[in-house]
Image (cartoon, rainbow, N blue to C red):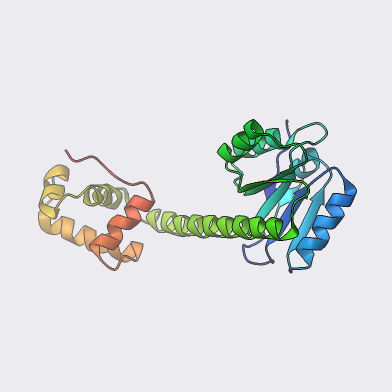
């Protein structure tokens, strides 16, 4: 498998939520497209997993409605391929031949729902609503982390060392002893760090460090 979907550079929020449909039966693709468009959702359809693998995914809240049984790469195998490519689009599986092991595998892989054909339109719409909201929250969280990471990159190496120690729960005096600095110097550094990171309080700064995974064990 050489081709994988690539995120586009389009800003998040520039488009309405998007539903991808991967289904080999044209009549089902058309029915699902009409259903989603009737509630104001944008839709992109594919007849097979390779078709989607060769496309670029716009940077908007989205989900994937995926048939389990497809020609070539199956829906479950496609789910695994997306995971390997670090693409975390929420998936709603649909099948006319579901079984418990298949359902368990899909849900363990992170699927939002597993609908057996024929399913009610409302059940599909409910599943899509949940999936898109999950994707929107994930994207919001990733934007927060990206913003914090950009602020962290403005810190000097010394400021990063001090931030790691402060986030580990050390007092100014302890940080000074660990780094061989005067306590007043540590206080000045900490003030600079809080200003650069936009932290309103020490607790706020510690939460930022934890979000970024910045932590150093106490000596």
Q: Which quadrant would residue 12 be assigned to in this image?
A: bottom right
Nearer the observer, 12 or 16: 16
Rendered-image quadrant of the C terminus: top left
- Quarter-of-image position of residue 84: top right
Q: x, y (%) of residue 146?
A: 48, 55
Question: Which residue occupies 38% across, 50% down?
Answer: 212
Near-viewer residue (161 or 78): 78
Q: How many marks?
A: 0
Q: Is residue 4 above or below residue 38?
A: above
The image position of residue 42, as x and y in percent, is 75, 63
Quadrant including the N terminus: top right
Q: Is residue 105 left or right of residue 180?
A: right
Q: Residue furthest right?
A: 27
Q: Is residue 213 above or below residue 206?
A: above
Left or right position of 33 against 87: right
Q: Where does residue 109 sit, x and y in percent of width and height? A: 58, 38
Q: Is residue 201 visible?
A: yes
Q: Residue at x 38, y 52 (%)?
A: 211
> Is 71 on the left-hand or right-hand side of 7?
right
Residue occupying image coordinates x 15% and y 57% = 185
Q: Is residue 59 visible?
A: no
């Amino acid at each position: 498998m050489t081709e994988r979907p690539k995120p586009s550079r389009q800003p998040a929020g520039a488009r309405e939520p998007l539903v991808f449909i991967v289904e080999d039966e044209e009549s089902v693709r058309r029915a699902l497209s009409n259903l989603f468009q009737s509630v104001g959702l944008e839709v992109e359809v594919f007849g097979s997993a390779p078709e989607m693998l060769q496309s670029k995914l716009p940077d908007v809240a989205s989900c994937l409605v995926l048939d389990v049984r497809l020609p070539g790469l199956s829906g479950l195998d496609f789910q695994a391929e997306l995971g390997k490519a670090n693409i975390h689009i929420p998936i709603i599986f649909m099948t006319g031949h579901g079984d418990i092991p298949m359902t368990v595998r899909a849900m363990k892989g992170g699927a939002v729902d597993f609908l057996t054909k024929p399913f009610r339109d409302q059940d599909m719409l409910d599943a899509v609503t949940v999936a898109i909201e999950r994707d929107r929250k994930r994207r919001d969280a990733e934007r927060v982390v990206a913003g914090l990471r950009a602020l962290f990159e403005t810190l000097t190496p010394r400021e990063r060392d001090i931030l790691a120690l402060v986030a580990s729960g050390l007092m100014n005096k302890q940080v000074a002893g660990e780094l061989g600095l005067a306590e007043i110097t540590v206080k000045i550094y900490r003030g600079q760090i809080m200003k650069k990171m936009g932290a309103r309080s020490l607790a706020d700064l510690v939460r930022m460090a934890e979000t970024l995974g910045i932590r150093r064990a106490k000596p």
